[in-house]
Amino acid sequence: MRHTVKAITAVGFFFAATTGSAWAQETAPLAGDIKAGKETAGICASCHGAEGISDQPGVPHLSGQYASYIQAGLMSYKEGHRKSTRMAEIVASLSKQDIANVAAYYGSLKPFDQVVKRTGATSPAEEDPFAEIRADAEECAACHGDDGNADTPGMPSLAGQHVSYLINALKQYQEGLRKDEDMQTFVEGLTKSDLEDLAYFYAAMEPKRAEPPTEGDAIAGLAITAPCSGCHADDGNNKDPKTPRLAGLDAEYLVAAAEGYRSGGRDHDVMREALASMRESDIKDMAAFYATKEPKALPVRKPLSLAEWVEKCDRCHNAGGHSTDPRFPILAGQNEAYLVNALKRYHGGERENSMMYAMSFLMAESDIAKLAAYYAGQGAD
Ligand code: HEC
Ligand code: HEC
Ligand code: HEC
Ligand code: HEC
């Protein structure tokens, strides 16, 4: 709650600052004296380096960063909006004017993105956003296929299945509510976030129709499945995320799933009742009907690749993080550990800034690590 209120204030500040309202003028940076600032900077050098180029992990470069940004940062530490034990002690001893002076001094130096040498590639390689999940999914591939399209009779395809249904099914195996010894073993050691990653991965894959059924009459199945269509849709491509899509699943698997509900191996009252009055031949016809339907791909939010993230960041921080606008700090060549900390704090809401919160709240830890490494590697040629 507190966070939301602060975030809104920060938006107000941003727009005020860009439109030059009276409020923005009140909070406009104080003019600083470079010479006086250079003296104050004596106490900063032990951490930030002699010329504002730091060689300590977690300590940012200051050289040539926008003075208004340095000043705002120091005021945030002073007022407790930004927390850092090391910086808190320093700013406590500085007046507002000292802060303006030292900010003016560092701002007057050559920008660090023109001093620190580039160590990384200029454009992030187009990589597979699912690279890490694919490694986890490798042990599933033998049965469910590389892309979640199983090609063995009796195996369920997972490609294009609903995320919520997949997560729930995996949890049911873990909790022993759904009984299949193999599946129970495979999911035993997976964490909640592993389950989610796997579910998103499979849901995003393009589903393919299973091999044609060898038993059952798909045309007879049309009448039999009429009462099912309220939940599973006419063609087995239902939209409700908790209900599994049946279109294109392997017929043998569908028969086994139906038997599971009927025998109590899968505990689900709705499904047990729905199937209660069916004859064995009806179940085969039902399976043949759904198995021959074309499965439709789902619109699933895929994780962003590094290149896609960077494209967003560069809109404000400029190409490669070489900012040319004082509202947005320079990131190119900045200390990597500092960038990681900054992004984690925006992500967690501890460092309050509505724009950076909006940018970072969907980031996974691996995204933060990759972005920090990328921007830290952008320096001068
Ligand atoms: C004891 C070590 C230490 C000293 C001395 C020190 N700093 Fe820092 N400074 C840090 C650390 C660590 C951080 C990163 C804190 C964080 O993650 O928010 C930091 C962050 C900053 C930032 C934020 C930069 C950004 O990109 O947002 C500014 C500005 C800054 N320091 C200015 C100064 C100035 C000016 C002085 C001297 C008056 C000074 N610091 C002295 C350790 C120090
Ligand atoms: C040895 C083969 C095999 C391997 C390996 C395997 N599975 Fe399965 N999986 C099955 C079988 C068989 C079923 C159907 C079991 C049942 O009737 O409950 C199944 C069912 C599932 C289901 C439920 C599908 C549905 O439509 O209800 C999910 C989800 C699933 N597996 C995910 C995975 C994941 C994730 C992995 C890897 C960590 C994996 N499986 C590894 C054989 C396997
Ligand atoms: C009221 C909604 C509803 C109706 C009606 C319904 N289903 Fe279901 N169906 C579900 C839900 C929810 C599940 C998932 C249950 C679970 O988690 O095991 C399911 C699961 C299934 C599965 C297992 C799919 C898999 O991937 O393992 C099959 C097969 C199935 N239904 C077939 C049918 C058939 C055939 C009918 C009609 C005779 C029918 N259902 C009627 C809601 C419904
Ligand atoms: C809409 C504009 C905008 C976008 C897009 C944006 N940023 Fe920012 N960023 C800002 C602003 C404004 C600040 C200063 C916030 C503050 O004062 O804490 C900032 C600060 C930062 C900082 C702290 C730098 C420092 O020296 O303290 C990092 C790191 C950062 N952004 C990284 C990113 C990354 C990575 C992305 C892309 C995922 C991104 N930003 C996208 C506006 C933006």
Image (cartoon, helix red, strand yellow):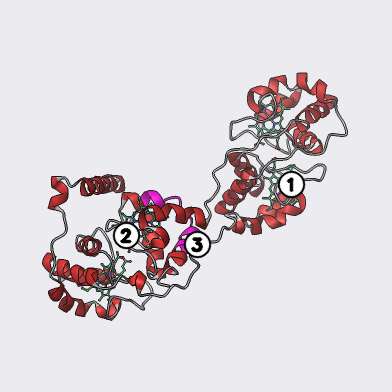
Quarter occupied by residue 74: bottom left
Please report the residue visible at 11 percent of the width from the left and 66 percent of the height from the top. Answer: 97
Main secondary-structure element of the magenta-colored stretch? helix
Mark 3 is surrounded, within 10 Å at the Cα level, by few (under 14), some (14 to 19) or many (20 or more) other residues, namely some
Vertical placement of residue 15 versus 132, above or below: above
In the rendering, at what x and y percent does residue 330 appear? Answer: 34, 63
Quarter occupied by residue 268: top right
**Residue denoted by label 2:** 324
**Residue denoted by label 3:** 123
Q: Earlier in the sequence, mark 2 or mark 3?
A: 3
Mark 1 is surrounded, within 10 Å at the Cα level, by few (under 14), some (14 to 19) or many (20 or more) other residues, namely few
Bounds of the magenta span? 357-371
- Residue nearest the observer in this picture, 129 or 351: 129
Select label 1 or label 2 by which is in front: 2
The mark tally for this picture is 3
Q: Under 8 Å from ligand 2: the CB of mark 1?
A: yes
Q: Is residue 176 visible?
A: yes
Q: Amino acid at mark 3?
A: Ser
Q: Determine whether the residue tagged by mark 1 lies in a helix, strand or loop.
A: loop
In the rendering, at what x and y percent does residue 211 appear? Answer: 82, 38
Q: Amino acid at mark 2?
A: Thr
Mark 2 is surrounded, within 10 Å at the Cα level, by few (under 14), some (14 to 19) or many (20 or more) other residues, namely some
Quarter the N terminus occupies:
top left
Q: Determine whether the residue tagged by mark 3 lies in a helix, strand or loop.
A: loop
Residue 180, numbered label: 1
Please say whether residue 9 is one of the residues in the magenta stretch: no
- Residue nearest the observer in this picture, 38 or 150: 38
Vertical placement of residue 51 versus 135, above or below: below
- Residue nearest the observer in this picture, 170 or 95: 95
Vertical placement of residue 261 versus 169, above or below: above
